[in-house]
Amino acid sequence: MLTLVFDLDGTLIDTAPDLIDTLNLILAQERLPAMPFEAARKLIGGGARGMIEKALIIEGRDCSKVEIDRMFGAFIAHYAEHIADRSRPFPHLEATLEDLAAQGHRLAVCTNKLEWLSRRLLTTLQLDKYFATICGQDTFAVMKPNPEILRQTIMRAGGAAAQAIMVGDSGTDIRTARAASVPVIAVDFGYTEVPIASLSPDRIISSFNELAEAIGEVSTRRT
């Protein structure tokens, strides 16, 4: 039995439409232009505050921590009410989770999203039932790429790092897994700022239909 730890945004769920809609609403309130979808999509991996900070840098806006805190609060308030307006699971996800759970694997989520927002999203999409634990940036007071969030997520799921695999979509996920000495499978349909192959994950998949085979391959290599 393995513990399989998934990133959320860009890995399990295509959350970009709702996140970017919210980001552009906040930018409009600051009298800044909207960010193009593809440019904003690359900012998602570091959490909502990271999105705001990077967007402000791109726009050449120098803001204090107090101002960013205010924008972050407005972002979360709006996003929480529109968390699944357009966000949807990536193709073949639910069938894959069903199969993995039936095989006896423990499933968990490790994300830089706030835990309560992560739970709300997965509950709204009726996917929360598959996960032994759902951990966010506030669960352990550390964020990816700090490996402690991954180690603690694995422990909370009842697993051990020596029998775990991470599944993510970005350099943040790969750095986190490497620092925790956990193999990592990367999806190539997520929100990475650079080509995922350039980050040298243990395996790359283009569909959840390929995940079971990738898990078997990575597990064999590890032993």
Image: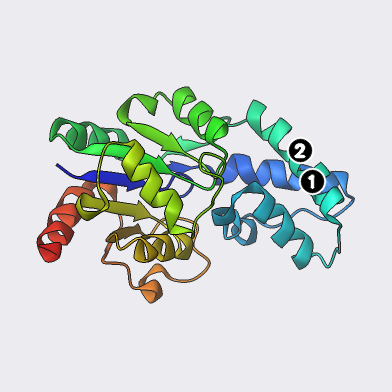
Classify mark 1: residues with Cα within 10 Å, few (<14), some (14-19) or many (20+): some
Q: Nearer the viewer, residue 202 or 94?
A: 202
Q: Which residue is mark 1?
A: 69
Local SS, label 1: helix
Q: Which residue is mark 2?
A: 73
Q: Answer with the quarter of the image where residue 70 lies.
A: top right
Local SS, label 2: helix
Q: Residue at x 13, y 54 (%)?
A: 216
> Could you say where residue 168 lies in the image, as x and y percent from the top left?
38, 54
C-alpha span from label 1 to label 2: 6 Å
Could you tell whether 61 is left or right of 46 in the image?
Answer: right
> Could you say where residue 167 lies in the image, as x and y percent from the top left?
33, 52
Q: Nearer the viewer, residue 217 or 162?
A: 162
Classify mark 2: residues with Cα within 10 Å, few (<14), some (14-19) or many (20+): some
Q: Is residue 129 visible?
A: yes
Mark sitting on residue 53: none
Q: Residue at x 48, y 62 (%)?
A: 172
Question: Could you tell me if the residues under marks 1 and 2 are in contact, i.e. CB atoms within 8 Å?
Answer: yes
Q: Amino acid at mark 1?
A: Asp
The image quadrant where one finds the C terminus is bottom left
The image quadrant where one finds the N terminus is top left
